[in-house]
């Protein structure tokens, strides 16, 4: 298996020797803009945690190229299966950031309509969502639809049994699924070397009988090409692809984590030089495509997104305690009705 | 001699692991992030540094793998103590726990016992997002072959974990995560309570609250408030769900004639239900009122902004205590 890393734009912005053709400039500009927004969203969400407005935020700072590309290569009718870390990808897909952050604000478990957006709820139990993704894809085929499913997970999640089962099911069924593993080098504190002895995560694809591609996960151009091809193949009936994106989690696992316990500043500083935004900016500026004016426009759009997010999250959705009982069954059981009445009485007494 | 010091529950459990690793070469600790990080709750802090990678190590991220590995290691003479990172993240290991951990001794007519401990941080009250606050004790308690311990104090966490590691049978050890960072006096040299013995935390004449784990301090607070209303309410801390201490629980209820079980888990088909059934069967002729439950609602654990409405609190407990047919006496 060829596990050479696909790269188009080098960290300094130059085009890599022998690289595949980059996507059109307009696509790269749109991608750069989306990354600027994603970066700002990561920073804003971090600030909201520090202010106590969000319970927790797993940041994708440093992984914005993956976040943006995963959404950008999908058609509107396609599906995205994100994890807790993929808030920016869900927003890039077009879901309102305040709705997305409902989960992390602690108002409800999922704040957007998965069917309306074709975005599954962000999954926390690792790798479990990958099987759902295969199911959605297989159902699309049975219905005669040509929808494609983008299924996200982290490097650590590839150790779970469900990862294996999902890859195997997808390959055996020929399901239209693209598995995008964001290898950000850590599962909380545990480095990749403790997850796998395989030469790469992409190399695992051979055991399932599907193509595996290792791509520079901080190179939006390469990700767009690789994921775009995988989506096309899936749509054309070519079955699943396993894509490993070589990237890095620049922030701690979450705000509750102390990354100093397991990784050095030097390592983080080294990855800062491979930043996905700096790289694409250098490339687009050198090509004369990214003007000062465009940069200012993107920055303003990012500020507007941050302000909308900040205001919406700070204002909050307002919670209704009785909603606890509302969605457990299509028809509430008699017991739930009784318990709901008990809570209502308590609340009325409190209010009086 | 006394070994009393102030320890948080995380430190008390860390001390128990250290003392067990020191006392017995066959004890090994493993799980997710338990090595250099010291666990997400720092329960295994410093163990890899002090005992080496062989005795405390990070595994690949797979709970079924962790428990399955522990089964094999226990078959081959070791005493694994494994950590599930959170209650709901132990579910991928369910098959190993139910089909193998719980049944091995029975299948082999006692030839192969599995002296392993599965530590699980559980329950809510920490503002955790979904899958971080489940009270999963009923699944384990319902599975014959598992010993299920649920300490409520830091001293019990220390003593019961030491006893669990020494037990020849597998133990599910439930750690109330909202207690992890609360400090209490712990005497590591105090005589340890035997596994399977409940304790009367507060004697009472009028009614008995029965609780375990994170609900014990809530029950004690309710009893305190009841006292100011002139009602003498006692509290029994089960400590051990399996084996169940019928004697201690029933002796109290027979004295008071009234009992309320308090637990965070949804009440339907729960440990609390089992307690009600056992008490009713054994104390029927002493009861002045039906044995009642104050539990979580029968809904998935709610998001952080709603958990205050879900968790059994002192108000809800006292409302039920008030309802125990006092006029009839
Ligand atoms: C089944 C399961 N076990 C444990 C956890 C706790 N946990 C949350 S995130 C995480 C690390 C995941 O690492 P990785 O898959 O690399 O994703 P990353 O967080 O790096 O994006 C762990 C262990 C979980 N969410 N689900
Ligand atoms: Mg990772």
Image (cartoon, coloured by chain):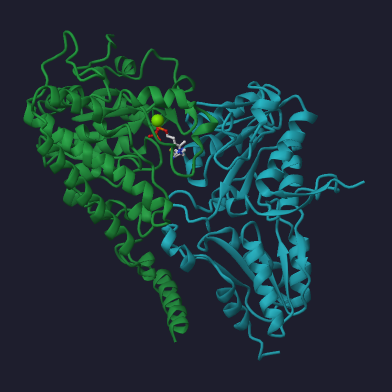
In the rendered view, does B52 fall on the left or right side of A68? right
Residue A240 visible within the image: no
In the image, is residue A252 above or below residue A11? below
Output the letter for the chain in green.
Answer: A
In the rendered view, does A84 fall on the left or right side of B320? left
Name the quarter where the C terminus of chain A is drawn. Answer: bottom left
- Percent coordinates x, y for residue A256 in the rendering: 49, 44
For the point 73% across and 39% down, the residue is B15
Name the quarter where the N terminus of chain A is drawn. Answer: top left
Q: Quadrant of residue B119?
A: top right
Q: Who is closer to the viewer here, A311 or B312?
A: A311
In the rendered view, does A215 fall on the left or right side of B70? left
Residue extending farthest to the front is A292
Q: Colour of chain B?
A: cyan
Q: Who is closer to the viewer here, A33 or B83?
A: A33
In the image, is residue B222 above or below residue A288? below
Query: How many labels sit on residues?
Result: 0
For the point 40% across and 14% down, the residue is A198
In the rendered view, does A83 fall on the left or right side of B73? left
- Percent coordinates x, y for residue B131 in the rendering: 44, 49
- Percent coordinates x, y for residue A184 in the rendering: 37, 28
Residue A154 visible within the image: yes
- Percent coordinates x, y for residue B294 in the rendering: 56, 69
Q: Who is closer to the viewer here, A240 or A227?
A: A227
Residue extending farthest to the right is B1
Q: Who is closer to the viewer here, B200 or A307?
A: A307
The quadrant of the picture showing ligand 1 is top left
In the image, is residue B256 above or below residue A99? below
Q: Quadrant of residue A19?
A: top left
């Amino acid at each position: 298996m060829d596990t050479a890393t696909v790269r188009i734009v080098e960290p300094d912005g130059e085009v890599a020797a022998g690289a595949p053709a980059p996507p059109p400039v307009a696509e790269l500009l749109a991608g750069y803009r989306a990354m600027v927004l994603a970066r700002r969203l990561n920073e804003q969400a971090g600030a909201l945690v520090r202010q106590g407005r969000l319970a927790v935020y797993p940041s994708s700072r440093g992984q914005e190229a993956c976040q943006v590309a995963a959404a950008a290569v999908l058609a509107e009718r396609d599906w995205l299966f994100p994890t807790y870390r993929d808030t920016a990808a869900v927003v890039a897909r077009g879901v309102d950031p305040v709705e997305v952050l409902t989960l992390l604000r602690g108002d409800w478990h999922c704040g957007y309509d998965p069917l309306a957006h074709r975005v599954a709820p962000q999954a926390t139990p690792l790798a479990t969502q990958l099987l759902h993704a295969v199911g959605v894809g297989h159902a699309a085929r049975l219905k005669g639809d040509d929808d494609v499913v983008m299924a996200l997970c982290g490097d650590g999640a590839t150790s779970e049994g469900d990862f294996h089962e999902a890859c195997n099911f997808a390959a055996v069924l020929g399901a239209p699924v693209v598995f995008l593993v964001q290898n950000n080098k850590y599962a909380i504190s545990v480095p990749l070397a403790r997850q796998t002895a395989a030469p790469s995560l992409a190399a695992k694809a051979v055991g399932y009988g599907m193509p595996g591609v290792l791509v520079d996960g901080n190179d939006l151009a390469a990700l767009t090409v690789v994921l775009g091809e995988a989506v096309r193949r899936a749509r054309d009936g070519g079955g699943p692809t396993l894509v490993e994106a070589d990237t890095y989690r620049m922030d701690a696992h979450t705000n509750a984590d102390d990354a100093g316990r397991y990784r050095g500043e030097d390592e983080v500083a080294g990855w800062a030089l491979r930043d996905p935004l700096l790289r694409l900016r250098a490339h687009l500026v050198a090509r004369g495509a990214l003007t000062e004016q465009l940069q200012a426009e993107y920055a303003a759009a990012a500020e507007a997104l941050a302000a909308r997010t900040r205001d919406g999250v700070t204002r909050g959705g307002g919670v209704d305690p009785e909603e606890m009982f509302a969605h457990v069954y299509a028809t509430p059981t008699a017991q739930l009705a009784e318990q709901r009445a008990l809570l209502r009485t308590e609340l009325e007494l409190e209010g009086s | 001699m006394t070994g009393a010091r102030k320890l948080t529950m995380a430190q008390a459990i860390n001390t128990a692991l250290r003392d067990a690793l020191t006392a017995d070469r066959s004890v090994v600790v493993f799980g997710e992030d338990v090595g250099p990080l010291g666990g997400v709750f720092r329960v295994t802090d410093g163990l890899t540094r002090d005992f080496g990678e062989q005795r405390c190590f990070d595994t690949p991220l797979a709970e079924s793998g962790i428990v399955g590995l522990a089964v094999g290691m226990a078959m081959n003479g070791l005493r694994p103590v494994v950590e599930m990172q959170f209650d709901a993240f132990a579910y991928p290991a369910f098959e190993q726990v139910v089909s193998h951990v719980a049944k091995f001794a029975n299948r082999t007519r006692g030839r192969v016992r599995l002296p392993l401990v599965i530590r699980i941080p559980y329950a809510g009250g920490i503002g955790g997002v979904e899958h971080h606050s489940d009270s999963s004790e009923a699944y384990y308690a319902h599975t014959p072959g598992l010993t299920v311990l649920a300490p409520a104090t830091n001293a019990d966490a220390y003593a019961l974990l030491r006893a669990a590691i020494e037990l020849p049978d597998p133990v599910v050890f439930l750690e109330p995560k909202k207690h992890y960072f609360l400090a209490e006096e712990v005497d590591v040299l105090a005589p340890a309570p035997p596994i399977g013995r409940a304790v009367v935390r507060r004697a009472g004449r009028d009614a008995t609250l029965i609780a375990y784990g994170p609900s014990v301090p809530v029950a004690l607070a309710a009893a305190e408030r009841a006292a100011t209303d002139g009602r003498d309410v006692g509290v029994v801390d089960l400590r051990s769900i399996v084996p169940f201490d019928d004697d201690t629980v029933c002796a109290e209820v027979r004295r008071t004639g009234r009992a309320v079980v308090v637990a965070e888990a949804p009440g339907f088909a729960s440990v609390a239900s089992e307690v009600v059934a056992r008490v009713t069967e054994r104390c029927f002729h002493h009861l002045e009122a039906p044995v009642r439950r104050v539990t979580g609602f029968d809904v998935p654990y709610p998001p952080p902004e709603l958990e205050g409405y879900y968790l059994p609190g002192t108000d809800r407990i006292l409302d039920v205590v008030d309802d125990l047919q006092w006029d009839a006496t």
